[in-house]
Structure formats: C-alpha cells, structure tokens
Image (cartoon, coloured by chain):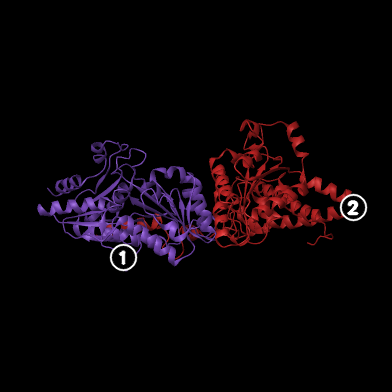
C-alpha cells in the first residue's frame, strides 16, 4: 500500500495504525483459539514509542524488546504474517514456532530477541554496542523495555557500563504505568525515571507518548548522540489500554482511570493532526485504515493455514547442527533396555 | 616435573587465540590491569589493549549479558566470573538467555561465548568461595561444560572451547593453578567431547574430572600396592558427556566408582551413577558408588574443608571395600 503524501506524520500514522490493527488481530487469534496459549501482551496505546524510536533507526542497528514487543518489531519492518504465524506456534513463523510472542527474533532485521524475563534483553545491547565499536561501525543498539524493568538491577548495571564505556546504545523505557497489575506509584517512590539515567551519566529525556512527533524528534536527537558514543535513556510515557495479558481483565484499576488513560491515544492524535493540517482527510484516512485492516485480517488466515512444526524438529537447535542432538527418552529406553535384554 | 603451570597454559591458550582471531575479547572483573584474581590474564591487556581486555564494574549479570549480546553480534567473547560461587547472580543470562537463544529463535543464531570461572576447595576461602557448582550448568540444556584437570587440558580444552559454536562454561579449579606439567601445545590429550584415560587397570573404573582426577590417580597408586588395578577416566567435558568411553571400561571391569567434588545429592556424581547403572546394568558386579562432596557448606577451617570433599584416602577406601 502506498501513501498519497510525503508527510512524515502520515508515515508514522500508517505504521502506528498497522501496529494497532495487528495487535487487535492478535486478540482475535486468541479468541478464535488459534494462538499458542494466552501469553499475549498487547502494545495498544504504546505505538508512538515503537514508531517514534524505530523510525530513527537504520539498517544494521540492532535492538532487543520485552514481552510487549510486537509494535517495536513491526516498526522495524517485520512481516506481520510471519509474526502472526509465530504467535500461533507455526513452523512458518519467525522462529519456527519455538519462540512465540515473547521470544520472537529476526537477525536479518537486527532483532536480537524479545524476552520473557523482565529486563533480560537489556545487557545484550551493551554487548552489541561493544561489537559495533569493535567493528568501527556507526550502528547503535537499542533496548526496549517497560517501566517494570526499572525494578531490575541488571538495568542499572547495563546503564552504568554503557555510560562508562561510551557505547552506541539507547535505552528506551516504555512507561505504560503498569508492571502487570502494579501501578508505577506502587513500585517506586521516584517516578521520574529519566533522572536516574542522568545520574548515571547518560543523556536522559522523558516524552509524551501520545504524541509521535515529539517522540520521534527527541528519539532522533538521542539516537544521533548514541551514534557518536553518547548513550541515552528515553522514557516514553503512555498508558496500557488493556490488561497485562489476554486473560487479565484489569480488576486493579477502575473504568474512570481507563477511560482517561485511553484518551492519551497516539493513533487518534496523529489522525486529528493530519486532518487539521490538511495533510489527509477523513476519507483518505478511512481508506488507509481499510487497507490496513485487510492486510492484518489476512495475517490471521495465514497463521491459521500455516504448517505445524514437524515433531522431529523438537531436538533441533538445542546445539549447533554440526553436533549430535540430545537423545530422546524413547530412544534411550530402546537402547538401554534393548541392550539389557540381549545381554 | 613439568615445564608449565596450569595458570600459564590457560593464559597461553587465551593469548594464542587472541592473536589468531581479532574478534576474541576478554571481559570481566579485574581481567585487565590486575591480571585476573588468579593471575590467568596477567599481561594480556598490555599485549592486546583495553578494548580487547575489558575491565568491568562488579556486575556479574551484565558481564554475562554483555557477552551474550557481543556473541550474537559476531564477537567471540570470553567472559570471566571470578568465582563459580557467583554463578547464581548470572543464572538468568546464562540459563534463560545464552543457553536458550538458539532454540527459542528457531536456530537463527548461536551464542558462541565462553564463561571462564573457577571453583573448588583448597584455599580456606569459605562457604561462598569454595563450591563446585557444575551441576547447575550440566542441568541446563544448551550449555557446554568443560572442566580441565591437567596442564595440557588447561591449554587444549580452552582452545577447543573457544572454537565451539555454542556457549561453554569453562570451570577451572583454584587448587590447580600452580600445578605443573608438560605442555605439548600441538597435541591435545583427546578431541573435544572425548574422555582421556590416563591409567588402565582391570579391577574397577574410577570416573572423575577436574582436581579429583589427581586424587583418583593418587588412590590408584596406593591401590596398586594392594594389588588392585584401577582404570581412571578423566571426563574433561561434562557436556558433551563421553558415555561411550565410560561404558567401554565399565563393561570390561564390572565395577565403577564416580568421584566429584560437588555435593552428593542430585549432583554430577548422581547423574553419572544413574547413567552407568542404566547402560551397564548387566555387566556390574556391585552398585555404582558415588564419592562426592558432603551435603554441607564448605568451612574455612582447613581440617573441616579438607574433609568436606573426597580425598585420595576416601577413594582408595571405597575401592578396597568394593573389592574385599
């Protein structure tokens, strides 16, 4: 699909709408019973973080994400069909059905992995930053994580190393106000998270995550600094529109709060701005939304029709394929008891 | 008497590999200017520079995590964990990240990193600096595990580890750094994944690794005076595990003792004993006997420390009881 305008905001709207619609379809995949499990964490409400930062990255840059990372990966060019197939646990998916929503990765796009351990992917960007400098490339590595990860010690270790070694690294904290069911003011006495980064010697900034243009502008500056060896930390304030995962009905917060939070909608805001500036109108936006809906509808069918992994792939890729795979329990039984009977 | 120490053989392995491959980097606490807590990396920062011999803050989880990211980005990092006792700090990066990345990501990429560390008793270092925690690693699919006992293997096994496509945890023994031996840097005792059999006998097999190899060899000398001839197997790597060599000799001798410095319960000795019992059941004259660390923390008192782990006397005593 081609946009009829060169507006940067229109391009951002397009990507954010694709993320929003993809996430809605992930929810449908679950309702249809075709997702592999219910460990599905939607990034609805957080699209501006993914797009604002992702659109400033370039080929060769790498990144890690967290359990709520679909949006970031899409913003970096993921094929939504292969993502949906992976979320359904199919062989056609990005990780042959072995990773799923929380362990999606693609080395070709620089995605060093989503992570189901809160904060688990953060130190990888320190290593990737060391490698980039070792190769004298100007690539950067970006760690995306939620506000929940600010409770993990490994974040501060990694921030310290990045600052100490002047690494081409950016830390992006998507502050959706909740770590599972715990609101940030129940998790920290000092919610100005970017100030922590400054105290570590990093460039620090905090932006309104309902405004993709602001996110993109600030992220652009931080990324440009990171490329020249000044690592940074960006906090994107937003609101998690829905529960922690698909089974969570958010009993820990009330409807008034949710209604208020959902007003901070980066997709709606971008749409209004495009109209008010005359860059697009309701008609052209509706048409764009319809095309995106059709694209994302197709991902569900693609995932549903995709092939299951072969059972005998279960022992593949524990180790490098040049070495023997682990022996199965059944093979060992046959060998050991077979030997005993012969003897 | 040998010409090289275990410590110098390790350093030579690192240095030779760093000369051959510019993507090898060392990263860890005190690896640079200090030269490593046990002196293994002494002088390497002068030879290769601070960009390749990277001193870190005291941040074990991120040392291992940075090595994971560096390995995924094309480097060959050798991370150093000063004591294996700190492995709990790093277990997420080691067991949830390094060990599982190849599998979780459908074989897209491996994590060719080394985690060098050291463990074991012998320096009155107390309960938090004297453990043998190899079972934690052996219990994690995706991690290779190498434990050199000899000067030759300090060199060759580390060289072989640095050529592996998968993450290797390489556990040295703190009581071995000053030991000496012949280093033939051209010929390893055995290829990667193969056990070495330094002593042959027909009465029983003693299966072991790391420092306990030397205790088993001392026990074998004593036993020979009593007319008991033991075969000694040095496993060298616990993953891969050379069950074929174990089976060959246990089937021939009909008796087996496994010796490990790690604690007995649910440990490496337990796994080895279970495998031998399953695989060699019809050839066994006696139950497979585990000689392992007592199920207690290690004391600072040299007397208590020495008696917390197997000794040559204990190994010999077990063999005599078995054959009496």
Closest to the observer, A224 or A176: A224
In the picture, the disc for residue A244 is: none
Left or right: residue B271 compared with residue A109: left
Chain that is red in the image: A
Residue indicated by mark 1? B188
Where is residue A308, by image quadrant? bottom right
Residue A309, percent from left and from top: 55, 59
Residue B277, percent from left and from top: 27, 51
Q: Residues within 10 Å of mark 2 (few under 14, many from 20)?
A: few
Closest to the observer, B155 or B294: B155
Q: How crowded is mark 1: few (under 14 residues within 10 Å), some or many (20 or more)?
A: some
Q: Mark 1 lies on which chain?
A: B
Chain that is purple in the image: B
Q: Distance between the residues labelled 1 and 2?
A: 74 Å
Question: Does the image show residue A121?
Answer: no
**At x 60% / y 39%, what residue is drawn?**
A150
């Amino acid at each position: 699909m081609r946009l009829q305008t060169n507006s940067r905001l229109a391009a951002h709207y397009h990507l954010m709408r694709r993320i929003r619609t993809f996430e809605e379809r992930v929810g449908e995949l679950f309702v249809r019973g075709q997702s592999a499990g219910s460990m599905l964490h939607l990034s609805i409400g957080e699209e501006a973080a993914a797009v604002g930062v992702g659109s400033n990255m370039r080929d060769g840059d790498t990144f890690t994400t967290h359990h709520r990372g679909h949006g970031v990966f899409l913003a970096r060019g993921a094929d939504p069909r292969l993502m949906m197939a992976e979320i359904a646990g199919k062989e056609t998916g990005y990780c042959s059905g072995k990773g799923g929503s929380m362990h999606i990765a693609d080395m070709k796009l620089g995605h060093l992995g989503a992570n189901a351990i809160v904060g688990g992917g953060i130190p990888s960007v320190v290593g990737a930053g060391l490698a980039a400098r070792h190769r004298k490339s100007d690539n950067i590595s970006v760690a995306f994580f939620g506000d929940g990860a600010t409770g993990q010690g490994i974040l501060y270790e990694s921030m310290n190393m990045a600052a100490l070694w002047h690494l081409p690294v950016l830390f992006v904290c998507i502050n959706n106000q909740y770590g599972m069911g715990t609101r940030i003011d129940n998790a920290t006495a000092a919610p100005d998270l970017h100030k922590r980064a400054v105290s570590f010697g990093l460039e620090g900034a905090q932006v309104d995550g309902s405004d993709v243009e602001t996110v993109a502008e600030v992220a652009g500056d931080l990324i440009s600094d990171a490329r020249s060896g000044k690592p940074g930390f960006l906090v994107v304030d937003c609101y998690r529109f829905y529960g922690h995962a698909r089974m969570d009905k958010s009993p820990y917060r009330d409807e008034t709060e949710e209604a208020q939070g959902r007003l901070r909608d980066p997709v709606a805001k971008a749409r209004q701005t495009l109209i008010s500036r005359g860059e697009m109108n309701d008609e052209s936006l509706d048409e764009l939304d319809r095309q995106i809906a059709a694209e994302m509808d197709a991902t569900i069918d693609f995932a549903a029709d995709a092939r299951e992994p072969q059972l005998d792939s279960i022992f593949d890729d524990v180790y490098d394929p040049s070495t023997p795979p682990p022996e199965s329990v059944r093979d060992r039984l046959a060998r050991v008891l077979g030997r005993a009977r012969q003897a | 008497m040998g010409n090289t120490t275990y410590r110098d053989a390790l350093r030579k392995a690192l240095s030779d590999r760093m000369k051959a491959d510019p993507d090898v980097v060392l990263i860890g606490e005190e690896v640079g200017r200090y030269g490593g807590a046990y002196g293994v990396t002494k002088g390497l920062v002068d030879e290769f520079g601070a960009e390749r011999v990277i001193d870190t803050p005291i941040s074990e989880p991120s040392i291992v995590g940075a090595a994971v990211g560096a390995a995924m980005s094309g480097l060959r990092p050798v991370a150093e964990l000063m004591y294996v006792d700190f492995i709990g700090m790093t277990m997420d990066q080691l067991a949830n990240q390094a060990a599982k990345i190849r599998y979780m990501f459908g074989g897209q990429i491996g994590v060719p990193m080394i985690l060098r560390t050291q463990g074991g008793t012998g320096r009155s270092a107390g309960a938090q600096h004297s453990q043998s925690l190899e079972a934690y690693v052996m219990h994690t699919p995706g991690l290779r595990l190498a434990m050199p006992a000899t000067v030759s293997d300090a060199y060759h096994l580390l060289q072989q580890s640095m050529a592996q496509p998968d993450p290797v945890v390489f556990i040295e023994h703190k009581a071995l750094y000053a030991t000496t031996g012949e280093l033939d840097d051209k010929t390893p005792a055995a290829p990667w994944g193969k056990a070495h059999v330094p002593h042959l006998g027909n009465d029983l097999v003693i299966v072991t690794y790391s420092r306990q190899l030397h205790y088993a060899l001392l026990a074998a000398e004593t036993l020979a005076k009593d007319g008991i001839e033991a075969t000694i197997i040095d496993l060298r790597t616990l993953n891969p595990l050379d069950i074929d060599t174990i089976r060959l000799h246990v089937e021939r001798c009909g008796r087996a003792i496994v010796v490990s410095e790690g604690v007995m319960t649910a440990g490496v000795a337990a796994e080895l004993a279970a495998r031998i019992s399953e695989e060699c059941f019809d050839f066994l004259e006696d139950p497979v006997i585990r000689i392992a660390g007592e199920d207690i923390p290690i004391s600072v008192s040299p007397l208590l420390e020495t008696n917390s782990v197997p000794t040559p006397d204990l190994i010999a005593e077990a063999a005599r009881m078995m054959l009496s």
